Image (cartoon, rainbow, N blue to C red):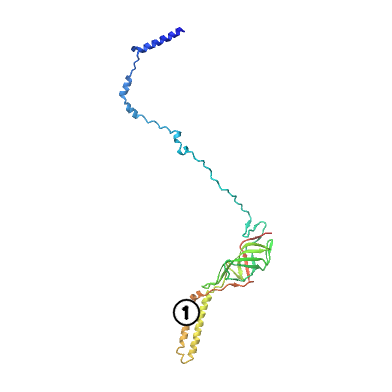
Amino acid sequence: MKYTFMQKFISLVFALLISAIPAFALELDTSVDDEIRRTYDPSKLEQSLPALPKTAPTQQNTVPKTSQTTQAPQTAPKSLPSTPVAKPQLGVKKLPNEYKFDKSTAIRIKKGTKFRVKSNSVISDYLKEGARVSFTTIKPVTQRYITVMDGTKFTAVVEDSHLPQMTGNGGLIVLMVDSITVNGQTRSVHGKITKANLKKIFFNNIKGKRQYWKGVANQIDKGENFYKKTRRTSSKLADNPVGVIISPIPTITGIVVYAVNFVGSPLFAIWSKGGRISIPAGSEFEIKLQEDVYLSL
């Protein structure tokens, strides 16, 4: 134990002596450093060095400002309650009178079926738009599974009407058949008048007679009648010795008036009116269906 301690002490003293003696001091060769300084300029070396690469910004800096502030939680907009779309019912039609029927079981009166009817009231061009008239069938009509007996009632509404007009136009009335009553069942229909008072009707328009050309003829007749009167007057004056002098004057006047009426008759006839419409009750009409009519069993 003592020997070990003495060894350590002697080694320590020996190390102190070596470091304290100048003869044993270490000399560093700095000639190499001087040579480098003379050859290279340290300031130029620093300028020629490449720039340091830019480091990526830290995650803390890249966080957007909006994320740093607390935001109120956004709630999804409430959607309105959706109602289920009603599925169309095949073969089922809703009429204006709120009657529903199934085509597979209903009795059909075909489109184009014609009915002979009689009017229950006077039909004239005095009727205003929106007025209603009625008809009653006078002959049964047979269809598949059904016979429409006489006495069936139709009703129609006046769609348009006017009194006789100038230029020779007659009165007008347009009827649209919109309902039928069969065996106590009233159904909406779409029909038109094809005959009125046994006369064929075109485009469902019941018209008064156009009398323009009749007005032209009337104007010519007026001129002719006036001329005949002046001729008779001239003849009476010619029998009198005093009146024979002035007897040509009435005849000349009659000729002038007759010529004016003859030439101007197309213009004068514009002021004449057409014929009136007045069909008495009980007159025969014909109704034609424009679409199918369905009746329940």
Q: Position of residue 9 (x, y in %)?
A: 42, 9
Q: Nearer the viewer, residue 263 or 161?
A: 161
Q: Position of residue 88 (x, y in %)?
A: 61, 53
Q: Position of residue 138 (x, y in %)?
A: 67, 68
- Residue displayed at 64% across by 64% down: 180
- Residue displayed at 31% across by 23% down: 37
Q: Position of residue 46 (x, y in %)?
A: 34, 28
* 251 to the left or right of 23: right
Q: Is residue 64 above or below residue 185?
A: above
- Residue displayed at 44% across by 9% down: 5
In which quadrant is the C terminus drawn?
bottom right
Question: Amino acid under label 1?
Answer: Val
- Residue 161 found in image quarter: bottom right
Q: Nearer the viewer, residue 221 or 89?
A: 89
| Residue placed under numbered mark 1 in the picture | 260
Work out which residue is located at the far bottom of the displayed protein and give it.
241
- Residue 289 found in image quarter: bottom right
Q: Nearer the viewer, residue 266 or 282?
A: 282
Q: Secondary structure at mark 1?
A: helix
* 100 to the left or right of 74: right
- Count residues near mark 1 (Cα–Cα under 10 Å), then give few for <14, some for 14-19, many for 20+: some
Q: Nearer the viewer, residue 265 or 94?
A: 94
- Residue 126 found in image quarter: bottom right
